[in-house]
Amino acid sequence: MQVPKCEICDDDFSSEEDGDHNPRNLKCSHTLCEGCIKKLLKNGRVVCPFCREPTEVPKNWDNFPPKCVEHPYNVAEFACIESNCSSKNKLMCQTCEEFGAHKGHAKELLITKTDKFRKKLEFWINQLKLNIQNCTVKKNELEEAVVKSEQLLNIKVKKIKNHFDKIRQSVDKKEKGIIDETTAEATRIQKFNNEKITYLIDLQARHVKDIEAIEKQKNMTDIDLYNTGIDLPCFFGHLNIEVFRPADTKEMDIKLPNFKFEDGS
């Protein structure tokens, strides 16, 4: 069988693992040797000299399509997407497509398939980052609500004390009951808001770990990413920020009893 040649330098492609004569398939499906691609490489891309379609070249040359398992003189630049394909190896070259186990099968460029994977991963990363931002906003609101509820408690307690100082001896029990009730409500509100803050902080930390895991997948080589597939994070989706509204402080409003004081006030 005649060994395929580079379409530029006309040299035979090499079957060695490394070297300038390794075949490299461009996005437009033209196949050049690695040496010619290096000469055409400019600003991280190669413009095909035949059709002028650009191909982004990864910094890691290993991210180029691997050699075909069945036909090592070719690169496996396609992924079989035939639903009834029985072949264990879903990566295929042009020879596989025309004469081999994948003859007549539907296919997709490996670089296109993995580009779709990366776009999905990027979407998840952006969504998780948005959730983290929303966590920060709601956490700040809740923290501010905690401070305000503490300030409100101080104001209410002072008002209660000023009112009951005039009738201290006769209404000590009533005063204490109202203070305890107000304090209990403030404590409940603070506990509610602090629990939400703790949850949001934990959620942020989990999202950061999810992003690290997804970034690791995103940075895989095409072959590793294709073989591994996409692993969804345990938690994913829009953050329902309405759930994290600060507790309402209306319950802290008090109605003081009316008393007729000796001075007529």
Image (cartoon, rainbow, N blue to C red):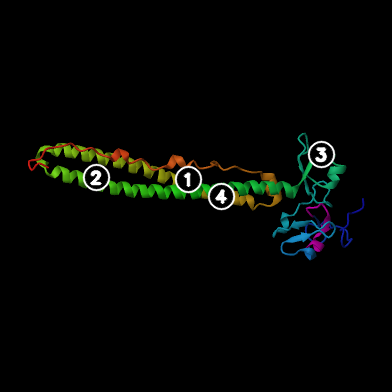
Q: Quadrant of residue 180?
A: top left
Instruction: Label 4: state its secondary structure.
Output: helix
Amino acid identity at mark 3: His
**Label tally:** 4
Looking at the picture, how far across and down is residue 170, in whole percent? 10, 38
Residue matched to label 1: 203
Residue at left 84%, top 47%?
A: 94
- Dot 2, crowdedness within 10 Å: few (<14), some or many (≥20)? some
Read off the residue under disc 4.
Answer: 211
Near-viewer residue (264 or 41): 264
- Name the residue carrying label 2: 156
Measure how far apart labels 2 and 1 are at the Cα level. Answer: 34 Å
User: Badge 3 is on which residue?
Assistant: 105
Magenta stretch: give its range: 26-37
Residue 209 seen from this side = no
- Side of 1 where 205 appears, left or right: left
Q: CA distance from mark 3 to mark 1?
A: 45 Å
